[in-house]
Amino acid sequence: MEGQPVAKHSQPNLQQMDLVDRCNEIISAIFWDLNAACQMPLIVQGKPEGIDWQYYEIMKNSTQAFIDQTFMALVECESNPANASRHIQALDILSWKIYTICAHAEAFRRLFETETDEIWDKVLELVKAEERSVEVFACTRGLEWRGPLLTKASDREWPHLQEALAPEINTAVFHPHQVVQTQDGYLRLATFEGHVQANISESFHNAKNFPEGKYLRLRDADTYPLLREPKWGPCALCGSLERCNCQPVFLAGDLVELREYPGKGIGTRTLTNLQPDTWIGNFVGELFPTSHREGYWSFAGTFCPPGRTRRLQDYKANINPERFGNWTRFANHHCEENTHAGSFLAGGRANIAFKVDQKINAFDEVLINYGRGYWQGAGRKCLCGSKNCVSKR
Ligand SMILES: [Zn+2]
Ligand SMILES: [Zn+2]
């Protein structure tokens, strides 16, 4: 298939920046759609009542139709090699696996119908460059990507299809935010003191760590250390001044991957464009009394009610994410950060959550400022290299 002449679509002259922005939007949308494609089967298996079956059916059928078109194009290409369609060219660039994973995303399928050659080329180039992230994203989320290929696999011999369908290790047994891409292209688990770090969605506390009495009854919601006090302000989701039943969901955080960065250890990298003022993740962990300050404590490990000065007695609890936490615990420091941690009041709880300060493009690192206090610790030197670096002052 290589080296064959290819029919080109018409090409409007896009400004270089517009082109980059457009391609970034498309690749962002591809990851959003892939996430939906990964989540939907889990939801359907979990509680079939109240599911939008139509959405699920459309998603499945559209992916299958796109793959069927690809097989038809392969047959056509045999008799008329000069007319390789975009499907064939893409398959040639990406391999069956990456191509079929991407075919689950509507944004990827639309790319073939609606975009110019210039954009099509550029997005394909981006997907190729980020194919490892595409693969890890889909596989750690349990996407059954082979499904649309299996119906065709026995028809006849297709180039490279059998290799693509070979069995592989199931990486979906871990939460995607327990799995780290290493610098040499492998995967490893995030560990702390020899234990795999657990992923949790909400902070929790153990009553025996709270001897003050107030927090002794573990299961009583009213004794939760980060209980939201209505006087701090309204619920960020419904605006209620009372304690409500709202549950914050930070969807954009699903689109973050963990990977090793040279000299920095694990970092957090977004696979989608993140817009300013978006809340992207809840900083969670095991809660301890503020008097408990042993070992390593996170920079954002305390909650101070808004509008108060930060005196120690104002803090409600420390959040320790070492054993139990989520992706936010892996965000690296930068002196010119693009995210900050703030109070997020919702439902019955006060949360510390990450909010985007300035647009973060797909494939850039989500960075936070650990604060001056952190860098005053012995032997700590920031290597961020920025003009205003805390370690240069
Ligand atoms: Zn609410
Ligand atoms: Zn710095």
Image (cartoon, rainbow, N blue to C red):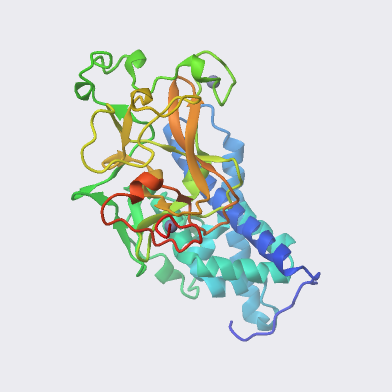
Q: Residue at x 26, y 41 (%)?
A: 323
Q: Residue at x 74, y 60 (%)?
A: 114
Q: Nearer the viewer, residue 332 or 197?
A: 332
Tell me if residue 89 can be seen.
Answer: yes
Indicate the quadrant containing the N terminus: top left, top right, bottom left or bottom right.
bottom right
Q: Would residue 167 be found to the left or right of residue 217 on screen?
A: right
Q: Quadrant of residue 162?
A: bottom left
Could you say where residue 174 lies in the image, as x and y percent from the top left?
Answer: 32, 47
Q: Nearer the viewer, residue 182 or 318?
A: 318
Could you say where residue 238 lies in the image, as x and y percent from the top left?
Answer: 59, 22
Q: Nearer the viewer, residue 338 or 161?
A: 338
Vertical order, 366 against 76 (above or below): above
Vertical order, 293 against 218 (above or below): below
Q: Quick one: which residue is furthest to the front in this view?
A: 393
Could you say where residue 318 lies in the image, as x and y percent from the top left?
Answer: 32, 32
Could you say where residue 97 lies in the image, as x and y percent from the top left?
Answer: 47, 64
Q: Nearer the viewer, residue 154 or 256?
A: 256
Q: Residue at x 41, y 52 (%)?
A: 333
Q: Quadrant of residue 208?
A: top left
